[in-house]
Amino acid sequence: MPGKTFCALRPLFKWLIILIAMCVLTACQSFKDGMLNPKGIVAYEERKLFFDTLALMLIVVLPVIVMSLTFVYHYRVSHRVRDYKPNWSHSHFLESLWWGIPCVIIVVLAILTWKKTHELDPYTRVKGYQNETPLLIQAIALPWKWLFIYPQQNIATVNYVEIPAGQPVEFWTTTDNVAMSAFFIPQLGSQIYTMAGMRTRLHLLANQPGDYVGMNTLFNGDGFAGMQFIVRVVSPADFQQWFDQIKKSSLPLTDDVYTNLLKPSKDNKPTFFNGVPNNLFYNIINTYISSSGTIHPRENQIKLNNFANQKE
């Protein structure tokens, strides 16, 4: 009887193994570019919290799985055992185990999560670097691209971020002419939502040079899939060299150029600008704060720009 059962279940096990293998293989790229391969302090702490939480939960889950399989095998119909007690119904000792242990684990998880939630708060500077001045980058979600402004250096980029290794970075984020988005660099740390008329903040620190993937993780329209950007982490000396190169060779980000960036476009290549209009980031936020009614704040501006281009 058991042999026949195994033969009947063999195709099921075969397809289950194939499915697991496919899942593992498709996750290879996600592992390479995701939070399980951290290149920054925040991402490392988040991965550690993930595995600590997983280990605590497995204390309950693994014994349940083992006991379930053991009971099915031990008390099967064809196996006569003397310890079978059909009238048994209660044990104070067992009740204390399967209620007490999960309760203790929940308390430990709650304390661990509460502590790490405050330590890894996106608005809080990276632990151990509170006294260092962060590099400020203003990130603006546009349709469907990212504009990054370096206000201290007076330069800007589209779909490209370069930061020095070992220096804290503070991102200010908002959106313009696109739905709510989500700013995320998986290998460096936390995700933060970006919303029109609001400024959200995110502190990160990269400690290994390299090229990483940044993305929008919230569906915001037709070009959502291509709304990704390059994050290049370099040495402080190479960062200064890159900054000097942008200052010499790039065109300025004028009001007309920015109006063109407001138009929807897909799969935009990295672009660099030398010079940014004063207080552009704050003006974008104020545009939505001061607006009212049902007309989008950017509707008339884009229409006028299109009309001027047609006349030319």
Image (cartoon, rainbow, N blue to C red):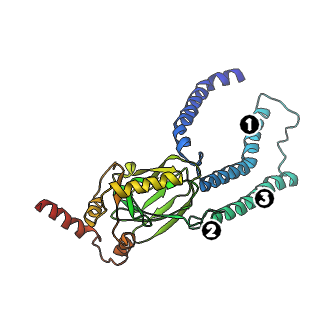
State yes or no: discs 2 and 3 in contact (Cβ < 8 Å): no
State yes or no: discs 1 and 2 in contact (Cβ < 8 Å): no
Q: Residue at x 51, y 53 (%)?
A: 237
The residue pinned by badge 2 equals 131
The residue pinned by badge 3 equals 104
The answer to whether one can see residue 146 in this image is no
Q: Residue at x 72, y 24 (%)?
A: 2
**Mark 2 to mark 3 CA distance (whole Å):** 37 Å
Residue 1 lies in quadrant: top right
Q: Which residue is drawn at 84% across and 56% down?
A: 96
Residue 263 lies in quadrant: bottom left
**Mark 1 to mark 2 CA distance (whole Å):** 55 Å
2 or 3: tag closer to the N-terminus = 3
The residue pinned by badge 1 equals 69
Residue type at numbered disc 2: Asn
Residue type at numbered disc 1: Leu
Other residues around mark 1 within 10 Å, as few (<14) / some (14–19) / many (≥20): few
Between circles 2 and 3, the one closer to the viewer is: 2
Residue 13 lies in quadrant: top right
Secondary structure of residue under mark 3:
helix
Residue 226 location (% of width, % of height): 38, 48
